[in-house]
Image: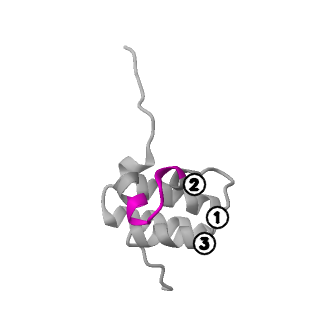
Amino acid sequence: MKVTFSEFKMEDYLNSEEMRKEYLNQVLADGDTEELKRALFYIAKSRGIESVAKKANLNRESFYKMFKPNSKPRFDSIFKVLNALDIRLVQA
């Protein structure tokens, strides 16, 4: 019997607002900026990159570039993505 595995895609598991919120809260608790960038990218992928980039007023190429490993996106770009994802950061 041959067993095959499919590639793990985080965005496949971020299929509800509750899951996205919990995932983002866990990432924020860790305080790792690279992990935060990855999390925002996965959340955007779970919602559709094209629509999130358009809502953030970013072209697709710029959107992908800002989420590359070791990139240093400007805060205002990250803020645009947060707004496009309807994410509000509040102190608990």
Residue 84 included in the magenta stretch of the image = no
Looking at marks 2 and 1 on the same chain, the residue that comes earlier in the sequence is marked by 1
Q: Residue at x 51, y 59 (%)?
A: 39
The percent position of residue 91, horizontal first and vertical second, equals: 51, 86
Q: Secondary structure at mark 1?
A: loop
Distance from label 3 to label 1 (Cα)?
A: 15 Å
Residue sitting farthest toward the top: 1
**Quarter containing the N terminus:** top left
Q: What label sits on residue 58 in the rendered view? A: none
Q: Label 3, on which residue? A: 75
Residue 17 vertical position relative to residue 90 in the rendered view, above or below:
above
Cβ–Cβ under 8 Å for marks 2 and 1: no
Q: Which residue is mark 1?
A: 32
Judging depth in this view, the residue of 3 and 18 nearest the camera is: 18
Question: Circle 2 sits in a helix, a strand or a loop, which is it?
Answer: loop
> Where in the figure is residue 6, as x and y percent of width and height?
41, 31
- The answer to whether the residue labelled 3 contacts the one labelled 2, judged by CB atoms less than 8 Å apart, is no
The reply to whether the magenta stretch includes residue 58 is yes
- Work out whether 66 lies above or below 8: below
Q: Which mark is residue 67?
A: 2
Name the magenta segment's main secondary structure: helix
Going from the N terminus, do you reach mark 3 or mark 1 first?
Answer: 1
Tell which tag, 3 or 1, sits nearer the viewer: 3
Left or right? Give the position of 44 relative to 66.
left
Distance from the alpha carbon under mark 3 to that under mark 2: 12 Å
What residue sits 44% from the left and 43% below the top? 9
Q: Amino acid at mark 3?
A: Phe
In this rendering, the label closer to the viewer, 2 or 1: 2
Please name whichever residue, 87 or 4, is drawn nearer the observer in this view of the structure. 87
Instruction: Give the extent of the magenta segment.
Output: 52-61
The type of residue carrying mark 2 is Phe
The residue sitting at 51% across, 55% down in the picture is 63
